[in-house]
Amino acid sequence: MPLDASTRDKLSSVSTATIATALFKRGMRNQMIQGAVPLRAGKSTMVGEAYTLRYIPAREDRNAVSVFQDRAHPQRKAVEECPAGAVFVVDSRKDPRAASAGAILVTRLQMRGVAGIVTDGGFRDSAEIAALDLPSYHVRPSAPTNLTVHEAIDINVPIACGDAPVFPGDVIVGDDDGCIVVPAGIAREIADEAVEMTAFEDFVTEKVKEGWSILGLYPATEEKTRVAFTAWRKDKGR
């Protein structure tokens, strides 16, 4: 199911922590992309459908610098075909010894309207990428070209990224805590539930700052909490 504007907006307004809890309620424990952190914190939440690139270990007879002259090279082709609004997700086999991409390619993604990029490897030119408006997530900076360790082999196929399974079209949400993968088929219901959870968590935070104990409040096991939350929602228009 394509990501609609309402679902995108709702996911943009909630945290990956809240989404992780909503997924855990459905038995899904392995949706966070492990190791991938934002190059620069404080950017807007990244939301988009996954468009994937898969690397395999490089073999010396196949990965000379001259391969980039091929206009159909999978890495170059993927950068030029990743749809606007999508998140470019790279399976670098959790190996940051060589770059998954550099500033020129990531700048091209930004110019094409891509929503963000995430890899379980590294980026070269990481300071330049961090300065872009595009949300970008990686494990650590890595100067060597991808060709020294990786071979780009597949575009828009199911991949593993930081131990999380990612299928094309899954919804990727990224914030300062990292990136989470929301299966496409349940993205709308997860978004709806996460918005509801966020309202309650905002109420709880306010009450904790007022001096309330978390016992009976979080979770809401006491009637006075439920009554107070109903009144709070009415007052806040939420």
Image (cartoon, grey):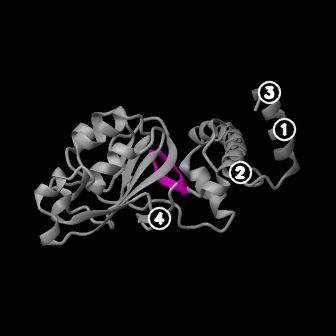
- Sequence order check, earlier mark of 4 and 3: 4
SS at badge 3: helix
SS at badge 2: helix
- Identify the residue at horizontal 34%, vertical 43% (top origin): 80
Q: Amino acid at mark 1?
A: Thr
Which is more toward the observer, 117 or 229? 117
Labelled disc at residue 36: none
Q: Amino acid at mark 3?
A: Asp
Q: Quadrant of residue 111?
A: top left
Labelled disc at residue 235: 3
Residue to which mark 4 is pinned: 158
Q: Label 2 vs label 4: CA separation?
A: 22 Å
- Sequence order check, earlier mark of 2 and 3: 2
21 relative position to 121: left or right? right
Q: Amino acid at mark 2?
A: Glu
Principal SS element in the magenta part?
strand
Q: Is residue 169 above or below residue 199?
A: below
Discs 2/4, front: 4
Disc 4 vs disc 3: Cβ atoms closer than 8 Å?
Answer: no
Crowding at mark 1 (Cα within 10 Å: few <14, some 14-19, many 20+): some
- Identify the residue at horizontal 26%, vertical 55% (top origin): 73
Q: Amino acid at mark 4?
A: Pro
Residue to which mark 2 is pinned: 189
From which residue to which does the magenta span run? 169-181
Disc 2 vs disc 3: Cβ atoms closer than 8 Å?
Answer: no
Residue to which mark 1 is pinned: 230
* Residue 67 image point, x, y percent: 16, 57
- Identify the residue at horizontal 53%, vertical 67% (top origin): 30
Q: Is residue 226 above or below residue 90?
A: above
